[in-house]
């Protein structure tokens, strides 16, 4: 539920997507590019990756630089109109919260049978009557396998969303296997949520992704 304070900084575009005002830049942008924070009962600012914690939402662009600026300039207190405390490790905790949420959803997808795991299974899924909506590739995985799956999806005109913001160790932790590189998720709410969270996580991992450039043309 969105509280009254949140509604003050919310607009709706023609597609119905929610937009919020970034307390750092003052720019209104889609909530897929923002992170919600709230002050806990002790006045500590905490990341709210799920967007469900009670209290006034304090929205910041989902990047390490924006959150660092908000902390250093004490913009959370200004936006909250109350003295709150934002610690220097807030960006790190925000990144961890997003990763934890995504890994939890991948675990749910595995247990629910909507996850395809491994190169061969993903390739067969792409060629099936119900192809996956989301391709998940470890950003530190070898380029060759990724390239083949991207080419297959393109050839079949599937227009899959590609997520490359998690590494193989994180994927392995979520899925109970070592060296996980390729996975895919069937259409549904989990695929949509993973796509949403992956976009927010990109603002914390641009340098890592740049060092492991995508093999896509």
Image: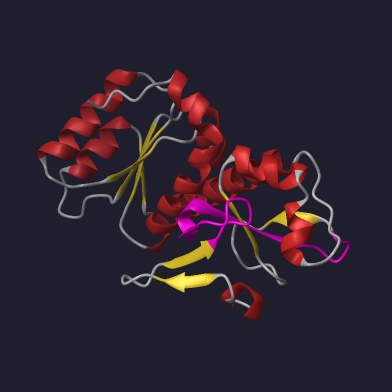
Q: Is residue 89 above or below residue 167?
A: below
Left or right of 113 in this view: 20: right
Residue 54 on the magenta segment: no
Tell me the quarter of the image containing the C terminus.
top left
Q: Residue furthest bottom?
A: 4
Q: Is residue 155 above or below residue 168?
A: below
Report how many numbered discs are placed on residues in the image. 0
Q: Which residues are magenta?
A: 21-43
Q: Position of residue 204 (x, y in %)?
A: 56, 37
Q: Residue furthest front?
A: 26
Identify the residue shown where x is 57% and y is 57%. Answer: 26
Q: Position of residue 3 (x, y in %)?
A: 64, 78
The reply to whether residue 200 is in sight is yes
Identify the residue shown where x is 85% and y is 66%. Answer: 41
Tell me the quarter of the image containing the N terminus.
bottom right
Q: How is the image coloured?
A: secondary structure
The reply to whether residue 140 is in sight is no
Identify the residue shown where x is 59% and y is 75%. Answer: 8
Q: Residue furthest right?
A: 42
Q: Position of residue 64 (x, y in %)?
A: 61, 38
Left or right of 88 in this view: 121: left
Identify the residue shown where x is 46% and y is 18%. Answer: 211
Q: Is residue 13 above or below residue 83?
A: below
Front-most of 42 and 30?
Answer: 30
Residue 35 on the magenta segment: yes
Q: Position of residue 67 (x, y in %)?
A: 66, 44
Front-most of 178 and 53?
Answer: 53
């Amino acid at each position: 539920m969105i509280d009254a304070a949140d509604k003050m900084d919310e607009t709706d575009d023609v597609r119905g997507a929610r937009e919020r005002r970034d307390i750092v830049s003052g720019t209104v942008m889609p909530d897929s590019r923002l992170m919600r924070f709230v002050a806990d009962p002790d006045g500590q600012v905490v990341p709210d990756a799920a967007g469900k914690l009670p209290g006034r939402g304090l929205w910041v662009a989902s990047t390490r630089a924006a959150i660092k600026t908000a902390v250093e300039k004490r913009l959370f207190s200004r936006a909250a109109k109350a003295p709150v405390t934002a610690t220097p490790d807030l960006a790190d905790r925000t990144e961890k919260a997003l990763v934890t949420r995504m890994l939890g959803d991948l675990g749910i997808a595995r247990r629910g049978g909507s996850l395809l795991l491994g190169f061969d299974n993903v390739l067969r899924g792409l060629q099936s009557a119900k192809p996956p909506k989301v391709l998940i590739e470890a950003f530190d995985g070898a380029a060759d396998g990724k390239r083949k799956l991207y080419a297959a999806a393109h050839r079949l005109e599937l227009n899959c969303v590609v997520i490359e913001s998690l590494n193989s160790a994180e994927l392995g932790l979520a899925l109970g296997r070592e060296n996980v590189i390729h996975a895919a998720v069937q259409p549904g709410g989990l695929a949509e949520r993973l796509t949403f969270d992956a976009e927010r996580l990109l603002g914390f991992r641009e340098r890592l992704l740049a060092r492991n450039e995508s093999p896509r043309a």
